[in-house]
Image (cartoon, rainbow, N blue to C red):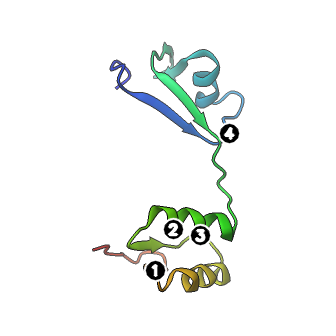
Amino acid sequence: LRHQRSNAILLTGYQAEGSGGRLLLDEGKLRIFGNITPIDLDVEQFSLSNHAGQKELTSFARACAPRHVVIFHADQDGREALSSIFAEEMKVHLPTNRVEILLE
């Protein structure tokens, strides 16, 4: 993929010093199989937080207008609060570990 100029690399969030993402942003290079390799593609960084509040989460979900929303990686109270907000607008799934969800 790196040989096709129509491709790009989009990085989200912070790229720590010494990481591959930081090397790519700063120098346009990546370590591939131990070799420093030039990457001749457009590289963009987007500042997206991995931690959003209820207002940001609900605004984002509503803007996407999905038929389903899957809520995970939150405490039970947070999951239930978001579930009640979305219940009339979309199908809400609150999965537990090892449970499959079929989205139709």
User: Are the residues at dot 2 and dot 1 in contact (C-beta closer than 8 Å)?
Assistant: yes
The residue singled out by tag 1 in the image is 89
Task: Kindly report the distance in space between the C-alpha atoms of the residues bearing marks 2 and 1.
Answer: 9 Å
Q: Is residue 91 left or right of residue 25?
A: left
The residue singled out by tag 2 in the image is 62
Residue kind at label 2, given as amino acid type: Arg
Task: Kindly report the distance in space between the C-alpha atoms of the residues bearing marks 4 and 3.
Answer: 23 Å
Residue kind at label 3, given as amino acid type: Thr
Q: Residue at image x 68%, y 39%?
A: 14
Closer to the camera: disc 1 or disc 4?
1
Residue kind at label 1, given as amino acid type: Glu
Mark 4 residue element: loop
The residue singled out by tag 4 in the image is 14
From the viewer's perspective, is residue 32 above or below residue 79? above
Task: Kindly report the distance in space between the C-alpha atoms of the residues bearing marks 4 and 2.
Answer: 26 Å
Residue 40's disc number: none
Q: Earlier in the sequence, mark 3 or mark 1?
A: 3
Q: Residue at image x 52%, y 66%?
A: 61
The percent coordinates of residue 101 (x first, y second) are: 36, 75
Residue kind at label 4, given as amino acid type: Tyr
Q: Earlier in the sequence, mark 4 or mark 2?
A: 4
Residue 58's disc number: 3
Q: Residues within 10 Å of mark 1 (few under 14, many from 20)?
A: some
User: Are the residues at dot 2 and dot 3 in contact (C-beta closer than 8 Å)?
Assistant: yes
User: Are the residues at dot 4 and dot 2 in contact (C-beta closer than 8 Å)?
Assistant: no
From the viewer's perspective, is residue 93 above or below residue 44? below
Give the quarter of the image for residue 91: bottom left
Closer to the camera: disc 4 or disc 3?
3
